[in-house]
């Protein structure tokens, strides 16, 4: 007889490099089972990165089915699971800036919280409409829809062309550059500026409510979760903020994934940065609940630099080996690595930058380069933390961290040394999926997970204290800043137009910027091709 553990909540964590489905016990926040499938990235030319949205969707179905099979093997009753769905456009940016007085990239800052950048969805959609005739015609013929990856998954999982629900949540909508983060609506003036028809955009909902129910997937016969409500939706960084239980003003977390993302909860007040950070919606936990806001610093390359060392340079066969190489020397020996593979994001927003390794000598070897790569992740975090401290006015006294890279103990100790404050890592690292599950379980009509502070489960943590003196930290940081200045101004934008209809996104971004793919796939489905 299957064991019943009370309400279970499932979370689909859709990342750049993999898809995962995780199941949590809503009463204890215990992770019960999960399954992960790696997804491919293609690099057809410099600055272009592509992924197949059908591969992503099929990986979601596979993860759901495999996890449910594991649950049955563990004799766990799955009947009560609830589900959550967790630089080719630079020339487009230049053309759009010609329409802005003074070429001011922050012209929409007080509506969207964002600068004009290749980073955000509206620019990608504009590129598609300008460069891919099939897409342009599909929009004109009303055969196309557009949305972020969450909307593609919700639409597909609720039936697709057979009645699928085209919706997103406020956190994902706030990263498109088409959404007014104050009125919580698509902005007509911004849609007009980008020349994007509003009727192709998804309905915007809260982060925690029932959007629809799972439908049977023809390619997976069992349909283990058919009829289960999909009741939560968060951008991955917002989900990590919730999973770290940063519900109070001034609480912050840093996620180390493909990129690196530092978010600080600013409460019900939107704070606009003077130091290169983004203003975004952190979450909205219910239809009639107020939105909460956050400041965000986004680093383009974090875990991706380890993957680059492995796949491109071949100096290591795994992430673990990179850590071992760095540990063997314990220093970069004056070598500094700026991994600006697709430009610099916060706080610079400089697309002309490119990666450099400087300070090389004949003594430098692969161990020093591995150490410098890890150190680069920490220096980038230091830059955005400094900016956040200036904007918030109250310096953080510790940094809460999560993400796959936090398993690297050398990295975590380096981070504490470079920040000169403790770094705190939860013992359960799946905070993004946990936050997503919390939003789903708390939704009206589901209500199996309480978000009241007194009801939240206490999380045990591992703590890393600074082990070098502040003077040494400041010296290394200053050398890093010098290297950053040398990385800038390497590239100028070029216009690429060859009719290629491949799906694309900006390299480092996870989850919420893999956006333009949805419009193309939806147009194919609606047209019946």
Image (cartoon, rainbow, N blue to C red):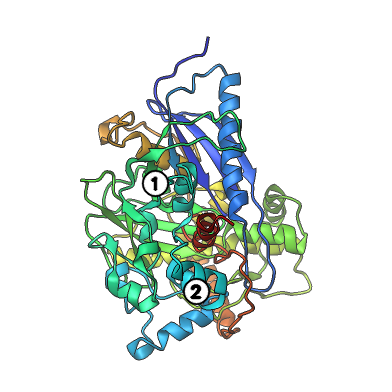
Identify whether 514 is placed above or below 162. Answer: below
Res 217 label: none
Q: What's the distance in space between the residues labelled 2 and 1, CA to CA? A: 27 Å
Is 64 left, or right, of 363 in this rendering? Answer: left
Q: Quadrant of residue 389?
A: bottom left
Q: Report the residue at 60% width, 25% height from top.
A: 70
In front of the other: 156 or 134: 134
Residue 469 visible within the image: no
Q: Secondary structure at mark 1?
A: strand
Is 259 left, or right, of 434 in this rendering? Answer: right
Residue identified by numbered label 1: 233
Residue 375 x %, y %: 58, 61
Q: Report the residue at 38% width, 80% height from top.
A: 105
Identify whether 388 is placed above or below 232. Answer: below
Residue 397 x %, y %: 36, 53
Residue identified by numbered label 2: 129
Marks 2 & 1, CB-CB < 8 Å contact: no
Is 432 left, or right, of 204 in this rendering? Answer: right
How many labels were placed on the picture?
Answer: 2
Q: Secondary structure at mark 2?
A: helix
């Amino acid at each position: 007889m299957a064991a019943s553990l009370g309400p279970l909540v499932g979370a689909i964590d859709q990342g750049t490099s993999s898809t995962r489905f995780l199941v949590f016990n809503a009463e204890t926040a215990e992770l019960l089972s999960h399954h992960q499938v790696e997804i491919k990235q293609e690099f057809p030319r410099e600055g272009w990165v592509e992924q197949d949205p059908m591969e992503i969707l099929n990986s979601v179905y596979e993860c759901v089915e495999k996890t449910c099979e594991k649950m049955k093997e563990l004799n766990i009753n799955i009947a009560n699971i609830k589900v959550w769905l967790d630089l080719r456009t630079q020339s487009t940016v230049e053309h759009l800036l010609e329409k802005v007085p003074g070429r001011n990239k922050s012209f929409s800052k007080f509506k969207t919280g964002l600068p004009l950048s290749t980073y955000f969805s509206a620019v990608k959609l504009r590129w598609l409409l300008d460069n891919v005739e099939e897409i342009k015609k599909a929009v004109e013929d009303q055969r196309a829809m557009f949305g972020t990856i969450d909307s593609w998954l919700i639409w597909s999982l609720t039936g697709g062309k057979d009645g699928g629900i085209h919706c997103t949540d406020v956190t994902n909508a706030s990263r498109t550059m088409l959404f007014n983060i104050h009125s919580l609506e698509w902005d007509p003036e911004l849609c007009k500026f980008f020349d994007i028809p509003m009727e192709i955009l998804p309905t915007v909902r809260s982060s925690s409510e029932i959007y629809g129910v799972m439908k049977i997937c023809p390619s997976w016969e069992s349909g283990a979760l058919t009829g289960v409500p999909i009741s939560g939706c968060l951008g991955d960084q917002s989900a990590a903020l919730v999973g770290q239980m940063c519900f109070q003003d001034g609480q912050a977390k840093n996620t180390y994934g493909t990129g690196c993302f530092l978010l600080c909860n600013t409460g019900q007040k939107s704070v606009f940065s003077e130091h290169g950070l983004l203003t975004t919606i952190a979450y909205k936990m219910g239809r009639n609940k107020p939105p909460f806001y956050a400041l965000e610093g986004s680093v383009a390359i974090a875990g991706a630099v380890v993957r680059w060392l492995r796949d491109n340079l071949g100096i290591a066969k795994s992430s673990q080996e990179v850590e071992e190489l760095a540990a063997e020397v314990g220093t970069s020996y004056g070598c500094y690595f700026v991994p600006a593979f697709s430009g610099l994001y916060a706080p610079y927003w400089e697309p002309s930058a490119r990666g450099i390794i400087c300070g090389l000598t004949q003594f430098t070897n692969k161990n020093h380069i591995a150490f410098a790569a890890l150190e680069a992740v920490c220096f980038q975090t230091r830059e955005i933390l400094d900016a956040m401290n200036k904007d918030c006015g109250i310096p953080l006294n510790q940094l809460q961290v999560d993400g796959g890279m936090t398993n690297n103990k050398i990295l975590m100790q380096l981070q504490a040394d470079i920040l000169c404050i403790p770094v705190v890592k939860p013992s359960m690292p799946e905070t993004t999926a946990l936050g997503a599950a919390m939003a789903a379980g708390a939704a009206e009509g589901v209500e199996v997970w309480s978000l009241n502070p007194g009801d939240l489960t206490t999380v045990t943590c591992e703590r890393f204290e600074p082990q070098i003196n502040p003077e040494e930290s400041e010296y290394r940081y200053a050398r890093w800043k010098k290297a950053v200045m040398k990385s800038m101004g390497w590239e100028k934008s070029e216009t690429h137009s060859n009719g290629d209809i491949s799906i694309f996104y900006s390299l480092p971004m996870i989850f919420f910027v893999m956006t333009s793919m949805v419009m193309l796939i939806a147009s194919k489905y609606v047209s019946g091709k």
